[in-house]
Amino acid sequence: MSSEPSSTDHPSLLHASRRTKSHAAFARAQKLIPGGVNSPARAFGAVGGEPVFFREATGQWLTDIDGNRYLDYIGSWGPMILGHRHPRVVAAVEGALAHGTSYGAPTEAETELAEAIVQAVPSIEKVRMVSSGTEAAMSGVRLARGFTGRERIIKFAGNYHGHADSLLVSAGSSAATLGVPNSPGVTAGTAKDTLVLPYNSPDALEAAFAKDGDTIAAVLMEPVVGNMGLVIPTDEFLQAARRLTHQHGAVLLFDEVMTGFRLAYGGAQERLGVTPDLTTLGKIVGGGLPLGAYGGRADIMDHILPAGKVFQAGTLSGNPLAVAAGAATLAQLRDEPPYQHLEKIGSQLEAGCRKAAADHGLPVWIARCGSMMTVFFQQGPEPIEVIDWDTASQSDADAYARFFWGMLDRGSYMPCSQYEALFLSATHTEDDIANTVAAVDEVFASMRS
Ligand code: HOZ
């Protein structure tokens, strides 16, 4: 099977000779792993060319198997807020490893992590640990249904909550990137209880609750969206979600898998001042190891088996290595909060991108919240404000691909899709950002020529 990009002038080919080992590794992987990758998000499907294979990471740096170094603007899609291999996290994992890798039985470390989560996120009174954000969302939805005795949920087009069947409806992230927002394999019966509304539309929410309010178990949302590129909610929209769920006895379920511990120590809900009933967590809460969690009001959480009747289980739930990495990450974030630094370098990157776009007359919409940001490339002449999937999906995917490869060739590893946010870490320096802005300026200039 050939793994060469078909077009001879594709931007991925400009410096392909620097990535010959990645090319060979991808060819080998494709023979055994569908599409050569274990998650479509990393397949470079929307930017063309072939994925880069990595051998190690330290701080803000990635090294690929050809020996190329990149500034990492993905951070494993969010978890690595402290940078790669933070000494405190490494020591905690090594400490846990010395004792055992899995017991299938409770440990005190799980309760300590639960205490840290509850202290950080006041809306979480009780929390259950699972192994991924997907599991957290799937279980949170089941719990909301079990608690309310209702079947329908509301989700928003372009929001992504992992790959549980009922949530792969108008989904963002790689489902949107690769053109399967409604996945084959999800039955009509499963999908019919998922009502999809436009993000940032209080009117659509009002109308849905006016029509079906007594059948809606939950409103599930990314309080700041990272999975259709970065999209920021209006206060009016968030307040409508809180008010309507409260009025109609539905659960407000925030998916903070990306935003938890990132937009503030208490997540997007702290930053935005809105209190959900339930919250899902993933990524940072596991410190780079597989761990998710869902938590919230004790009266709701106590419906989970064995306290209540809603089933959810897992051999590796609360795995000791993942718990150690998560607890060390949260402790570090609490002891030396990086949020001011992240805001500073985030605004430096945003300002640099805005200036470069203006200097080169490139039509872009730039959205940023703390250490998450997206540059939406547009057709112009005037930028369209990106507020929902309708506006996000009008972006110029070819322009994004040229940007992505131009940045990769200049040593910055950006998200390989217009519909993913970039992430900064505490280890990125102002000099790193200045170098990246210089590269952005060059790439934007090349895109106008
Ligand atoms: N949640 C990640 C970003 N949208 C995707 C990670 C993955 O599926 O590999």
Image (cartoon, rainbow, N blue to C red):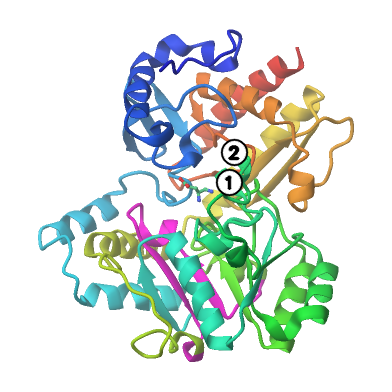
Q: Which residue is situated farthest in the right direction here?
A: 381
Looking at the picture, which amino acid does disc 1 mark? Ala
Residue located beneath label 1 in the image: 175
Residue 223 against residue 305 in the figure, above or below: above
Q: Position of residue 71 (x, y in %)?
A: 46, 32
Q: In the image shown, does 29 or 349 lie closer to the viewer?
A: 29
On screen, residue 342 versus residue 60, left or right, reads right
Please give the name of the residue rendered at 75% of the width and 53% of the height, measured from the top-left corner: 388
Q: Is residue 123 visible?
A: no
Q: Which residues are magenta?
A: 273-299
Circle 1 Cα neighbour tier, 10 Å, few/some/many (<14 / 14–19 / ≥20): many
Instruction: Tell me the quarter of the image containing the N terminus.
Output: top left
Looking at the picture, which amino acid does disc 2 mark? Leu
- Whether the magenta-drawn stretch holds residue 290 is answered as yes
Q: Is residue 380 visible?
A: yes
Residue located beneath label 2 in the image: 178
Compute the Cα span from label 1 to label 2.
Answer: 6 Å
